Image (cartoon, rainbow, N blue to C red):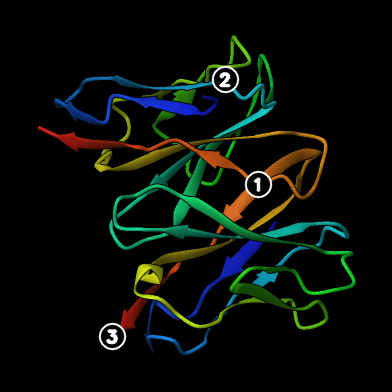
Amino acid sequence: DGGITQSPKYLFRKEGQNVTLSCEQNLNHDAMYWYRQDPGQGLRLIYYSQIVNDFQKGDIAEGYSVSREKKESFPLTVTSAQKNPTAFYLCASRLGGSWNQPQHFGDGTRLSIL
Amino acid sequence: AQKITQTQPGMFVQEKEAVTLDCTYDTSDPSYGLFWYKQPSSGEMIFLIYQGSYDQQNATEGRYSLNFQKARKSANLVISASQLGDSAMYFCAMRGTSGGYQKVTFGTGTKLQVIP
């Protein structure tokens, strides 16, 4: 079945360590997004990408980096510069070209500091 | 810049009653889209309903309807005949453009609890 796969489901980071969250979609969607969700809070946009090899910073990009080398993949790296990385991270994709297309979400990755 | 505001952090509703969840937005885009999503405690995001800025009629999807008032920049979600399974976080989101790129911004959400 088509969908978005995020891995791992749970991730632990040590001090000074970079970690990478995986996001893969087989929906043939053009646009992909990364959001951060803190407990009891809304979703804040980290990065988004409309096409391969192009991405834009969202509202809270500092301490994060992304790449979009393939249409189906949009990995997020949480760098050591992100001092408070503990959160729930959601990846989404969306079919471009029409205003009424909703985002499809993965099941999320919970990141914690060791 | 675009912004979504949800002013109700939490709401209670009696089972089988209707409930309205508020959403106001701010954007300078002439064309935009508004979405509502449901997030149960398990964490997945479920798409509920969409309203386009040029749609003449309010959107409806089963027990969900959207009270869209463009001049007031509001897009409130109405859930009719509430069920226990409706207990969840509800997010309003807006799709607009930023520097030519498609951007989707979410509000802070409303936690709805349905009381038996």
Residue at image location 41% in from the left, 70% down from the top: B86
Q: Is residue A63 above or below residue A99?
A: above
Mark 1, secondary structure of its residue:
loop
Mark 3, secondary structure of its residue:
loop
Q: Is residue A22 above or below residue B73?
A: above
Image quadrant containing the C terminus of chain B: bottom left
Residue type for callout 2: Asn
Work out which residue is located at the far left of the displayed protein and give it.
Answer: A114
Residue at image location 20% in from the left, 23% down from the top: A16
Q: Please say whether residue B61 is visible from this viewpoint.
A: yes
Residue at image location 52% in from the left, 74% down from the top: B6
List the residue tagged with mark 2: A26
* Position in image of residue B61 (x %, y %): 66, 66
Q: Is residue B108 left or right of residue A20?
A: right
Respond whether the residues carrying marks 2 and 3 are from the same subunit: no
Q: Are marks 1 and 3 in contact (CB under 8 Å)?
A: no
Residue type for callout 3: Pro
Residue at image location 40% in from the left, 76% down from the top: B83
Question: Mark 2 or mark 1, which has the lower sequence index?
Answer: 2
Q: Nearer the viewer, residue A60 or B36?
A: B36
Q: Is residue A48 left or right of residue A62?
A: right
- Subunit under mark 2: A
Q: Choose mark 1 or mark 3, whichever is in front.
A: 3
List the residue tagged with mark 1: A102
Q: Choose mark 2 or mark 3, whichever is in front.
A: 3
